[in-house]
């Protein structure tokens, strides 16, 4: 799972306007990001229209973290043991075209 999350973070970092928002020395299978100029809720809806499930974390639910970083919301993708590298690639392609 951590391996796939690392691949997802790398793929997201390569996309123009996408910023991975994960902090910390050790990172888990939850990957958070924003897309420049677009609300995370809209990005999440566009991904869902492509069959890609994500959620949105809002600042009101993470006040200590997101408030200090001046983030209103972030897209949250959870990678699991059953996901594949091909699905990660599809995720990044879907985000690049939404």
Image (spheres, rainbow, N blue to C red):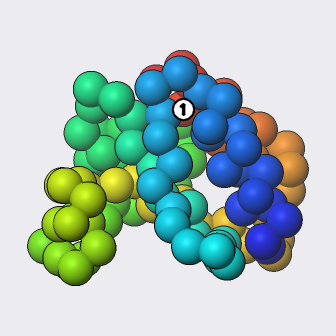
Residue 7 in percent (x, y) is at 79, 51
x and y, in percent, of residue 10 in the image: 72, 44
Which residue appears farthest toward the left when viewing the image? 60
At a point 56% along the width and 44% down the height, the residue shown is 51
Q: Crowdedness of circle 1 by 10 Å Cα count: few (<14), some, many (20+)?
A: some
Residue situated in front as seen by the camera: 62 or 25: 25
Residue 59 lies, with reference to residue 86, above or below; the image says below
What residue is drawn where x is 76% and y is 58%?
6
* Horizontal side, residue 37 vs residue 8: left or right: left
**Residue wearing tag 1:** 95
95 on left or right of 61: right
Residue 45 visible at all: no
On the question of residue 66 being in view, the answer is yes
Please state the total of marks drawn on the protein image: 1
* Residue 46 locus on image (x, y percent): 40, 35
Q: Quadrant of residue 39?
A: top left
Which residue is pictured at 66% across the width and 50% down the height?
9
Q: Which image quadrant: the N terminus?
A: bottom right
Residue found at x 85% / y 56%:
84
Helix, strand or loop for disc 1: helix
Indicate the position of residue 29 as horizontal and vertical percent values.
66, 72
* Residue 85 horizontal side relative to residue 50, left or right: right
């Amino acid at each position: 799972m951590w391996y796939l999350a690392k691949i997802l973070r790398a793929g997201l970092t390569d996309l123009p306007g996408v910023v991975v928002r994960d902090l910390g020395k050790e990172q888990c299978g939850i990957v958070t990001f924003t897309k420049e100029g677009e609300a995370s809720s809209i990005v999440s809806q566009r991904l869902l229209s492509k069959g890609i499930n994500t959620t949105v974390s809002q600042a009101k639910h993470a006040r200590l973290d997101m408030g200090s970083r001046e983030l209103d919301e972030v897209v949250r993708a959870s990678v699991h043991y059953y996901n594949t590298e091909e699905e990660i690639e599809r995720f990044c392609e879907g985000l690049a075209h939404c």
